[in-house]
Amino acid sequence: MIEFKKYRKVAPTFARVLTVEDHEERHGVVQAPEGLLPFVPGDYLARDAKGEWVIRQATIQNRYQRMVPEDEEGFAQYLRTDVSFAAAMPEPFVIDGMRGKAGDYLIVNNESGGWPVDREIFEQTYQLVE
């Protein structure tokens, strides 16, 4: 049986608002490592060394705190403020059209649904909550 434990994301997220121009240029989707993620203007484009992904506007507003002002590209540093449940998955999996590999983590949050996170990224950016 897979055991989900409480984790908090401790690494900052770099993100910027997605615009109407972004929507036109990207045809309303971001190519993330986990698959194509649709977005609407007002959602946020997050990025790290492994790629880009979408964070819904309501999620940023309700679950993140901006830590520094925006840079010249519009990106700011955000810190997630809530706790989620996560578990390493023994087999490849799909959730809401996003793909995870065997060993990747499935993160579940009552407010935000679920999403896969690459094992290496998860282990560098999340911390177990005792």
Image (cartoon, rainbow, N blue to C red):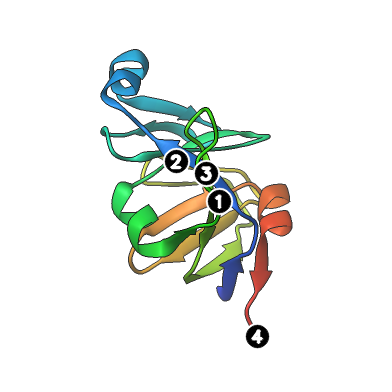
Separation of residues labelled 1 and 4 (CA atoms): 28 Å
Q: Which residue has dot 1 on it? A: 68
Which mark sits nearer the N-terminus, 1 or 4? 1
Instruction: Report the front residue among 50 and 42.
Output: 42
Separation of residues labelled 1 and 2 (CA atoms): 30 Å
Label at residue 98: 2
Q: Which residue has dot 3 on it? A: 76
SS class of the residue under badge 4? loop
The amino acid pointed to by label 1 is Val
The amino acid pointed to by label 4 is Glu
In the picture provided, is 15 more to the left or to the right than 91? left
Report if the CB atoms under discs 1 and 3 are less than 8 Å apart: yes
The amino acid pointed to by label 3 is Ala
Separation of residues labelled 1 and 3 (CA atoms): 6 Å
Label at residue 26: none
Which mark sits nearer the N-terminus, 3 or 4? 3
Q: Is residue 62 above or below residue 97?
A: below
